[in-house]
């Protein structure tokens, strides 16, 4: 894929009619295989007794951290949102981190991938909302605080999905393209710095995307809960510290 | 810019990835964490239970230890009291036994002393009387006997009526024999005086039988059937001996004394 190709969608490796295998799909499969393969390798020999393997420690730390983040936004039953939000984060993070590998094209640099993820969020938000509050309860959100707000709410729902997709695409695409351009202009030092910056940006974008999706879902599932600030409590009978509960920020 | 086929494919890819990770990653990891947490909770609960049990056991052991210590002190004090009582009783018993032994010893000593004194006095008296008897026997001869018989006849003449009348009564019964004993053969003059005196005393016609009896030592004895009139050393000495012995017995009885004071002082020393 050359510099002129702004999206990996345009790098088509195989096509049969309308069916095509481009770089986005291929590298998505690669990323998915790495993630699922690694998870399978680690989780096939999980232990409940100490000592644990270092990879099990690593995965438990990652998942506990994600659960902690989810719990800060959705205190009740955070495990319900972990597969969707966690997969968003893991997929985007691994894709962005692997972009440092030569000849690897991050699927997230494709607007199609970002749009697909945004569409998933767009569908997941009402699904979670209806699951939590029922169909009527969820639909009532669109006429809050007054029916006059219905068009604005619908527009807001769509626009934030578009914003999700474009934000991720812009960051990832720009990072890759800037690195490619700097490689031409100053091939010795700047691309390294830019790649390091790209790693940081990629993790931040993965975090932002997952958190925004979580906030959207939370706003749909917990809109009926008036107080959004929950004070941290601690049960004196329990020795284990409760996770810190913070302020719920709506995106 | 947006390839909708790719978008659709990516949606499918993402959903498949969510499903795979839900099975291979989240479910397993969370399950392992929950199982471990449950296990830790069980262990912690077990540890709490064991700690409570241990605390309870410790309290019980402490109470039991205190009770045992108290019982030990009590038993020790009781044993000390019993030992002291036993010691006092044994000491008292030993003192009583010692006192009894001393009392018996003193009594035995006094009895032995008394018996010794009695025997010694008796032997002394007997020895004295034997000496007197021997001396008198040595001194006794015809002359002395003549004097004694003379004295006897003189006294016969002066005897009271009882001494004279009783043989007369006996003689009145028809038995008129009188046996006259002397320590040595006497002369005829003496015989005549005696026979005259006997006739005076017993009446005429009395049959007189003379007999020599050296055991009389010195003197004379008149024997009728149931009466005796005598004046001789043997009878006098027998009377004196009897009287001396009686006097000695009375004196011993009057001089029996309580146990000596030294016995009490020795007993008190033993108690201390």
Image (cartoon, rainbow, N blue to C red):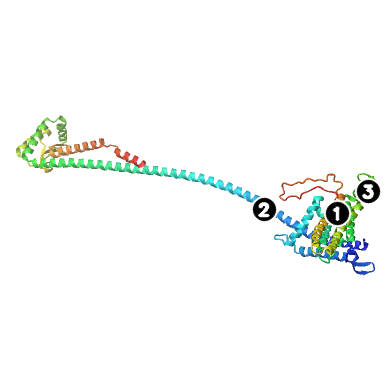
Label 2 belongs to which residue?
B47
Query: Which quadrant of the view contains residue B207?
Result: top left
Q: Give the Cα distance between marks 3 and 2.
A: 59 Å
Do the residues under discs 2 and 1 have CB atoms within 8 angstroms? no
Please tell me if label 3 and label 2 are on a single chain: no
The chain letter for the residue carrying disc 3 is: A
Do the residues under discs 3 and 1 have CB atoms within 8 angstroms? no
The image position of residue B253, as x and y in percent, is: 26, 36
Q: Is residue B255 above or below residue A184?
A: above
The chain letter for the residue carrying disc 2 is: B
Query: Which quadrant of the view contains residue A16?
Result: bottom right
For the residues carrying marks 3 and 2, which lies nearer the camera in this image? 3
Lateral position of residue A120 relative to residue B80, left or right: right
Q: Is residue B191 visible in the rendered structure shown here? A: no
Residue density around tag 3, few if under 14, some if 14–19, many if 20 or more, within 10 Å: few
Q: Is residue A23 visible in the rendered structure shown here? A: yes
Viewer-proximal residue among B83 and A83:
A83
Label 3 belongs to which residue?
A152
Element class at badge 2: helix
Query: Which quadrant of the view contains residue B37?
Result: bottom right
Marks 3 and 1, the one that precedes in the sequence: 3
Q: Give the Cα distance between marks 3 and 1.
A: 19 Å
Lateral position of residue B156 relative to residue A229, left or right: left
The residue lying at 95 percent from left, 48 percent from top is A151
Viewer-proximal residue among A151 and B46:
A151
The image position of residue B95, as x and y in percent, is: 37, 42
The chain letter for the residue carrying disc 1 is: A
The quadrant of the rendering that contains the C terminus of chain B is top left
Lateral position of residue B206 relative to residue B20, left or right: left
For the residues carrying marks 2 and 1, which lies nearer the camera in this image? 1
Label 1 belongs to which residue?
A213
């Amino acid at each position: 894929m050359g510099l002129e190709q702004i999206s990996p969608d345009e790098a088509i490796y195989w096509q049969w009619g309308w069916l095509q295998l481009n770089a986005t799909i291929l590298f998505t499969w690669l990323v998915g295989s790495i993630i699922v393969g690694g998870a399978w390798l680690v989780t096939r020999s999980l232990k409940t007794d100490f000592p644990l393997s270092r990879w099990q420690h690593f995965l438990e730390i990652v998942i506990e951290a994600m659960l902690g983040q989810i719990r800060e936004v959705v205190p009740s039953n955070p495990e319900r949102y972990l597969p969707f939000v966690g997969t968003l984060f893991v997929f985007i993070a691994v894709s962005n981190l692997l972009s440092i590998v030569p000849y690897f094209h991050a699927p997230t640099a494709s607007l199609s991938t970002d749009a697909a993820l945004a569409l998933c969020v767009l569908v997941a938000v009402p699904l979670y909302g209806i699951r939590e509050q029922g169909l009527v309860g969820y639909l009532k959100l669109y006429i809050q605080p007054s029916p006059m707000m219905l068009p604005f709410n619908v527009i807001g729902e769509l626009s934030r999905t578009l914003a999700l997709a474009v934000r991720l695409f812009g960051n990832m695409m720009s990072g890759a393209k800037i690195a490619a351009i700097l490689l031409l202009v100053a091939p010795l030092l700047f691309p390294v710095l830019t790649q390091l910056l790209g790693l940081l940006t990629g993790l931040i974008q993965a975090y932002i995307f997952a958190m925004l999706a979580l906030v959207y879902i939370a706003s749909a599932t917990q809109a009926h809960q008036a107080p959004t600030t929950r004070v941290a409590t601690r049960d004196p009978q329990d020795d284990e510290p409760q996770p810190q509960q913070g302020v719920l920020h709506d995106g | 810019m947006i390839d909708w086929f790719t978008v659709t494919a990516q949606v499918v890819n993402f959903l498949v990835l969510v499903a795979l990770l839900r099975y291979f990653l989240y479910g397993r990891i969370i399950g392992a964490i929950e199982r471990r947490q449950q296990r830790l909770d069980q262990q912690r609960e077990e540890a709490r239970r064991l700690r409570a049990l241990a605390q309870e056991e410790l309290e019980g052991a402490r109470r039991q230890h205190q009770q045992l210590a108290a019982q030990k002190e009590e038993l020790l004090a009781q044993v000390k009291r019993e030992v002291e009582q036993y010691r006092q009783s044994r000491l008292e018993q030993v003192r009583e036994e010692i006192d009894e032994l001393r009392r018996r010893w003193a009594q035995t000593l006094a009895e032995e002393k008394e018996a010794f004194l009695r025997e010694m006095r008796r032997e002394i008296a007997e020895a004295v009387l034997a000496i007197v008897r021997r001396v008198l026997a040595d001194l006794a001869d015809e002359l002395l006997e003549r004097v004694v018989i003379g004295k006897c006849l003189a006294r016969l003449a002066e005897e009271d009526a009882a001494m004279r009348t009783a043989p007369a009564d006996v003689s009145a019964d028809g038995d008129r024999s009188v046996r006259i004993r002397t320590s040595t053969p006497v002369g005829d003059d003496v015989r005549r005086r005696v026979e005259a005196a006997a006739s005076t005393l017993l009446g005429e016609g009395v049959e007189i039988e003379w007999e020599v009896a050296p055991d009389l030592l010195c003197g004379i004895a008149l024997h009728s059937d149931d009466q005796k009139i005598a004046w001789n050393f043997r009878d006098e000495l027998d009377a004196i001996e009897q009287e001396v012995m009686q006097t000695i017995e009375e004196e011993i009885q009057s001089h029996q004394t309580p146990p000596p004071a030294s016995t009490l002082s020795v007993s008190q020393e033993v108690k201390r």
